[in-house]
Amino acid sequence: MFNLQDKHEILIIDDYRDHLQLLSGLLHEQGYRVRGASDSEMALKSIKAQLPDLVLVDIKMPGMDGIELCHRLKLQENTESIPVIFISVLSGFKDKARAFRAGGADFITKPFPKEELLAKVSTQLRLLDFIRVEQQQHH
C-alpha cells in the first residue's frame, strides 16, 4: 500500500555525466531515492524494472530524445501517470510546446537555480501523492 512517508524515487536521464551527478547529488541531499540513466534506451529498461515516481529528462540526447521518451511513457498504461519534468538548454517556445504536447508536466531551463528545480520536483510529487490518495479512496 502506498504510504506518504515513503521516499520518492526519481529517475534522471541525461547524457552528460556531470549533469547527472549534479542532479543526483542535489536530489539525494533532499532525501529522494535517485537513479540515473545516460540515454533513453537505458531509461526504458530501468523504468520497466522498477517504476519511478518522477522522471527528470534532458531533451537533447543521442538516439531517442527526451520528448520521444516522454511520449512513449504517456502511451503506456503503467507509466502514463509518471510526471516527466524536462531539463534543457533549449528554452524557445517551440521546444517547450513540443515538451508539453508530449505529456511533460514541467520544464526547467539550464542552467537552473537549485531552488527552482527543488520546488518543481516537490510540487509534482505532492500532486502525485494527492492523486494516489484519491485513487486509494475510490477503490
Image (cartoon, rainbow, N blue to C red):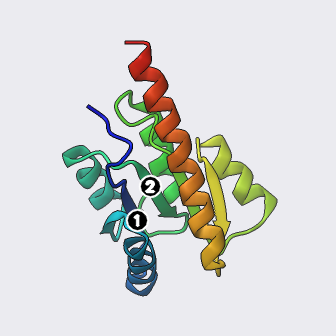
Q: Which residue is mark 1?
A: 12
Q: Quadrant of residue 117?
A: bottom right
Using the rendered image of the protein, determine whether residue 132 is visible from the camera's viewpoint.
yes
Q: Position of residue 44 (x, y in %)?
A: 30, 51
**Which residue is at the front of the view, 39 or 7?**
7
The answer to whether residue 65 of the structure is visible from this angle is no
Q: Position of residue 40 (x, y in %)?
A: 37, 59
- Residue at horizontal 45%, vertical 50%? 69
Residue shown at the point (78%, 65%) measured from the top left: 92
Residue at the spot x=53%, y=46% of the render?
Answer: 126
Q: Amino acid at mark 1?
A: Ile
Numbered label tally: 2
Amino acid found under the numbered disc labelled 2:
Val
Which residue occupies the extreme top position in the image?
A: 139
Residue that lies at the very extreme toward the right in this rendered image: 93
List x then y, in percent, for residue 108: 65, 66
Please tell me whether residue 54 is drawn above or below residue 23 in the rendered image: above
Q: Position of residue 86 (x, y in %)?
A: 57, 60
Q: In which quadrant of the rendered image does the N terminus lie?
A: top left
Mark 1 secondary-structure assignment = strand
Question: Mark 2 and mark 1: span between their CA atoms?
Answer: 6 Å
Element under disc 2: strand
- Residue 72 got which mark? none
Observer-nearest residue: 8 or 60? 8
Residue drawn at x 73%, y 50% is 97
Name the residue carrying label 2: 55
Q: Is residue 83 above or below residue 76?
A: below
Quadrant in which the C terminus is drawn: top left
Q: Is residue 48 left or right of residue 57?
A: left
Q: Earlier in the sequence, mark 2 or mark 1?
A: 1
